[in-house]
Amino acid sequence: MRKIRLAIAGLTACSGCQLSLLNCEDELPELVERFEFSFFPLACSPAELTGEYDAAMVEGCLSMPHEKELLLELRARSRYLIALGTCAVWGGIATLRNGENREQLRQLVYGQNPVADATFDPKSLKDLVQVDAGIVGCPPETAELLRLLAGLLRGALPEAIDYPVCTECNMREKLCLLLGQNKICLGLLTSGGCGAKCPSLSVPCEGCRGPALETNLEESFDVYARHGFDRLAVRGRLRRFCPEWLL
């Protein structure tokens, strides 16, 4: 069987999404047998784009001109382009200061370093190119990454998860942190797939997976309001990982 040819790249990000794949240590020997990691600068050298790819997996958001060039080339060379992680899918925490004076921010962070002269407001991959699928999470769950790769072996893409974190919390029969402890937990509105790891450890969901596809916004806001959290407070927390959430 022909190996699936992959390109895996990182843009403006922390590299955590790519590291999640490398952390699949038990599965790596089999992955190497089934996939050709043709372009993977974080893990393999030389890192040169050559030929065509069955899929490109891209972590991070866009904030610099050379990232635009890389993404456009990956899109042109790849049958599928997959956004890897919340930053790639929704923009992520790098977008928190979007809308503020870019030059002032650049001076504050970089000073006179000319390398950063051409930075622009961070944006998600879909703002520039067609994205065929996305895996959310900060970082994504290793099980999700493995399911993605298993699907590529069959020529299939992952389906978007349409239920919220609250569904997984209920399935695990965990105490609701919002209803039971009056904590502002965003599981009502956040995309599931993480197994409700944070709420299971009594840590409120912070919304790092972006918006759930199937939610009743008005009813959810009513629930938050009954526990002392107004719409503005909830909306502000939600937009930390997805700037277009509830515009």
Image (cartoon, rainbow, N blue to C red):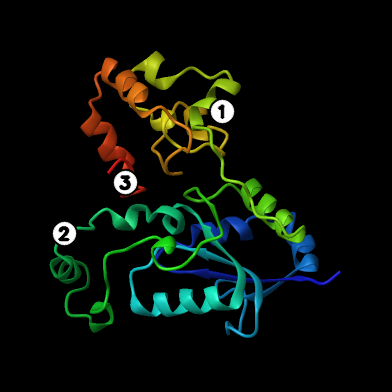
Q: What's the amino acid at mark 2?
A: Glu
Q: In percent of the image, x 38 and y 63: which residue is there?
A: 127
Label annotation for residue 240: 3
Tag 3: Cα neighbours inside 10 Å, few (<14), some, or many (≥20)? Answer: many
Tag 1: Cα neighbours inside 10 Å, few (<14), some, or many (≥20)? Answer: many
CB of mark 3 within 8 Å of CB of mark 2? Answer: no
Above or below, 240 against 62 in this view is above
Q: Between 173 and 215, which is closer to the camera in this rendering?
A: 215
- The picture places residue 228, in percent across and down from the top left corner, at 24, 19
Residue behind mark 2? 100
Label 1 or label 2, whichever comes before in sequence order: 2
- The picture places residue 81, in percent across and down from the top left corner, at 56, 65
In the rendered image, the residue lying farthest to the front is: 130
- In whole angstroms, how far apart are the C-alphas of marks 1 and 3? 22 Å
Q: Which quadrant of the figure contains the C terminus?
A: top left
Q: Which quadrant of the figure contains the N terminus?
A: bottom right
Secondary structure of the residue carrying tag 2 is: loop
- In whole angstroms, how far apart are the C-alphas of marks 3 and 2? 15 Å
Secondary structure of the residue carrying tag 3 is: loop
Above or below, 188 against 228 in this view is below
Secondary structure of the residue carrying tag 1 is: helix
**Visible in this render: residue 183?**
no
Q: What's the amino acid at mark 3?
A: Arg
- The picture places residue 118, in percent across and down from the top left corner, at 26, 78
CB of mark 1 within 8 Å of CB of mark 2? Answer: no
